[in-house]
Image: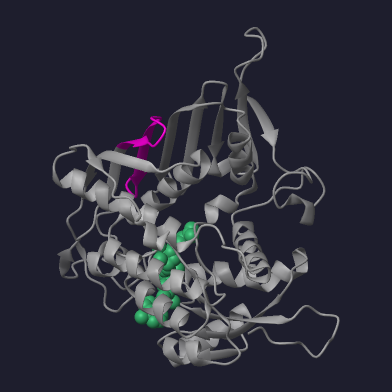
């Protein structure tokens, strides 16, 4: 299925087609543009085509981000012979339809998180991915924080048993862009487009991280959610998500209902019995994009803060009490995940590198014919936790078990 390049020494080309070209579109474009210049890969990603709905805007985006062609219908993008991998960077209401169509057309898929807007959609996507796997295709979800080197390294330390049996997983993901009650009603605030609010947007990341780092699923939750500002100014036109488009939501504009949560707070249990605490909010004034976690085990602890993403704090509880304590590991050594391909030790990486790492891992999986991680099953597992959180919150925090992923889609 991959195209041969005219240069016999170059790896075969892998044509990428991307749908959506705003925030994540820009971030993924950067990853696709530089991944084969940083890592040695079995296939060479080619930025073949990008799709959007507005002809002028999508052409401008193609030029800006380095895509060879532009389409105004994602179906046309999927149908292109020069596209072997479809990268979905649109709001959640279109993930299932685009991903299933792409898989059925024989394409590999990368889909942004959360995998879908409902468990039913996520199940259909996992089933389509399972059928596609038998045809040699792969499907991956964009939980990019797994690709922060410090967090990949944390996973390695936990898997090696450096923390022993886990007792606590504590994760929070805080932003503040909804503090202003006049921030407009963008797609992220409407259930029909976003599925849920801070829960699906930020909560999905931290649930995935907890399950990834601990290596085990969240099996039940007890949750509270809240929508603090229930009506916001309607937009003059459909708009992008995070930044308030200036001038569009004029003061005095008619207001419409916010149909998702502003914040979600929940506790949970992992399969081993470890206790977990989660907090996701877009109302945490002063916090721009703060993702913090701490994991405590019988032999030690790890702590991480996205605002210092090159660092991991590690405490080894077996060291003599007099000198034990959290120490800072600067995760920039060649033996740390992904670092061998980058700069000399101490030359730090940032947020955007996670998208290069994501592209690298997906291309390696395609080349090797192995399942990429996180898979659509992993995305479905997160979706089931989000659904349990919403159910628990509706019942005023009653403990709610998470439905297991059935064997047929595993
Ligand atoms: N991994 C991360 O850290 C991260 C961060 C932000 C967003 N996301 C996820 O990425 C996805 C997109 O979010 P974003 O922040 O890029 O949103 P955005 O609003 O910045 O961009 C959405 C893009 O999708 C396009 N679009 C919307 N509906 C479409 C359709 N039916 N057909 C074609 N194009 C369509 C819009 O025109 C726009 O280009 C969401 O699922 C979101 O949850 C992930």
Asked whether residue 29 appears in the rendered view, the answer is yes
Screen quadrant of the C terminus: bottom left
Residue 126, image quadrant: bottom left
Residue 16, horizontal then vertical, whole percent:
59, 80
Residue located 17% across and 55% down the image: 230
Label tally = 0
Compared with residue 67, is residue 161 higher up or lower down, i.e. above or below? above
Residue located 69% across and 33% down the image: 329
The answer to whether 400 appears left or right of 338 in the picture is left
Q: Nearer the viewer, residue 332 or 317?
A: 317
Asked whether residue 177 appears in the rendered view, the answer is no
Give the farthest residue toward the top. 322
The answer to whether 363 appears left or right of 146 in the picture is right
Which secondary structure class fits the magenta region best?
strand
Residue 303, horizontal then vertical, whole percent:
55, 32
Q: Nearer the viewer, residue 223 or 59?
A: 223
Report if residue 283 lies within the magenta region: yes
Q: Which residues are magenta?
A: 267-284
Compared with residue 248, is residue 142 higher up or lower down, i.e. above or below? above
Residue located 58% across and 82% down the image: 84
Quarter of the render that holds ligand 1: bottom left
Compared with residue 297, is residue 348 higher up or lower down, i.e. above or below? below
Residue 375, horizontal then vertical, whole percent:
49, 61
Give the farthest residue toward the left. 395
């Amino acid at each position: 299925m991959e195209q041969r390049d005219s240069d016999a020494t170059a790896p075969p080309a892998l044509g990428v087609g991307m749908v959506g070209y705003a925030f994540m579109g820009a971030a993924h474009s950067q990853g696709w543009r530089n991944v084969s210049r940083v890592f040695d890969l079995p296939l060479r990603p080619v930025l073949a085509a990008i799709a959007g709905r507005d002809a002028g805007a999508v052409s401008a985006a193609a030029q800006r981000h380095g895509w060879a062609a532009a389409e105004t219908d994602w179906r046309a993008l999927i149908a292109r012979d020069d596209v072997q991998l479809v990268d979905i960077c649109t709001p959640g209401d279109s993930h299932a339809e685009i991903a299933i169509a792409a898989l059925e057309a024989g394409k590999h898929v990368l889909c942004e998180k959360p995998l879908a807007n409902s468990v039913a959609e996520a199940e259909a996507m996992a089933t389509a991915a399972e059928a596609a796997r038998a045809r040699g295709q792969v499907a991956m979800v964009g939980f990019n924080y797994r690709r922060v080197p410090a967090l990949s390294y944390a996973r390695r330390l936990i898997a090696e048993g450096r923390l022993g049996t886990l007792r606590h997983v504590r994760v929070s993901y805080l932003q503040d862009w909804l503090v202003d009650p006049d921030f407009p009603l963008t797609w992220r605030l409407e259930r029909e487009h976003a599925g849920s609010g801070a829960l699906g947007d930020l909560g999905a990341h931290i649930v995935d991280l907890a399950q990834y780092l601990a290596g085990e699923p969240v099996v039940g939750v007890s949750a509270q959610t809240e929508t603090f500002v229930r009506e916001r100014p309607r937009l003059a036109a459909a708009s992008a998500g995070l930044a308030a488009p200036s001038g569009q939501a004029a003061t005095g504009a008619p207001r419409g209902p916010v149909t998702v949560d502003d914040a979600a707070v929940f506790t949970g249990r992992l399969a081993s019995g470890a206790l977990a605490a989660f907090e996701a909010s877009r109302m945490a004034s002063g916090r721009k994009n703060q993702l913090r976690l701490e994991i405590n085990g019988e032999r030690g602890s790890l702590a991480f803060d996205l605002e210092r993403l090159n660092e991991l704090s590690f405490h080894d509880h077996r060291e003599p009490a007099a000198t034990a304590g959290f120490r800072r590991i600067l995760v920039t050594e060649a033996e740390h995940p992904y670092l061998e391909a980058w700069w000399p030790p101490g030359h730090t990486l940032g947020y955007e590198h996670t998208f290069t790492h994501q592209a690298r891992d997906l291309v390696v999986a395609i080349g090797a014919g192995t399942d990429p991680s996180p898979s659509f099953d992993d995305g479905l597992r997160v979706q089931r936790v989000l659904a349990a959180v919403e159910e628990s919150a509706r019942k005023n925090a009653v403990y709610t078990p998470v439905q297991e992923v059935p064997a047929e889609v595993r």
